[in-house]
């Protein structure tokens, strides 16, 4: 069974980077977030998203806040 999610919602990605839901959807529409569409649903691909941020340990829903050196605050 898979333990790590491969996708997250646009809202979860917005929370991780600290932007609004609307801004995140605009970023997705501009191709600034690595997304895939499944029907009407837009999902952010976790691995490329975290790589884009230079982060490997953020789990969706875990708050995603770090203190700058990768440690959760």
Image (spheres, rainbow, N blue to C red):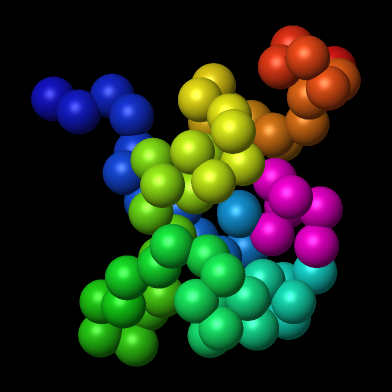
Of residues 30 and 10, which is closer to you in this image?
30
Using the rendered image of the protein, determine whether residue 72 is visible from the camera's viewpoint: no
Q: Main secondary structure of the magenta part?
A: helix
Give the side of residue 34 with respect to residue 33, left or right: left
Using the rendered image of the protein, determine whether residue 30 is visible from the camera's viewpoint: yes
Of residues 19 and 2, which is closer to you in this image?
19
Q: Residue at x 34, y 87 (%)?
A: 40
Of residues 32 and 38, which is closer to you in this image?
32
Give the side of residue 42 with respect to residue 61, left or right: left
**Which residues make up the magenta segment?**
14-19
**Residue 15 point in image, percent of width and height:** 73, 52
Q: Is residue 15 magenta?
A: yes
For residue 12, which quarter of the picture?
A: bottom right
Q: Residue at x 71, y 35 (%)?
A: 63
Give the side of residue 24 with respect to residue 44, left or right: right
| Quadrant in which the C terminus is drawn | top right
**Residue 62 point in image, percent of width and height:** 64, 31
Q: Residue at x 74, y 50 (%)?
A: 17
User: Outermost residue, left direction?
Assistant: 1
**Residue 44 point in image, percent of width and height:** 44, 60
Q: Residue at x 69, y 59 (%)?
A: 14
């Amino acid at each position: 069974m898979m333990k790590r999610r491969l996708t997250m919602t646009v809202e979860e990605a917005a929370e991780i980077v600290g932007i609004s839901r609307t801004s995140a959807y605009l970023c997705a529409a501009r191709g600034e977030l690595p997304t895939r569409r499944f029907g009407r649903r837009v999902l952010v691909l976790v691995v490329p998203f975290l790589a884009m941020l230079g982060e490997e340990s953020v789990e969706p829903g875990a708050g995603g806040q770090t203190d700058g050196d990768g440690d959760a605050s």
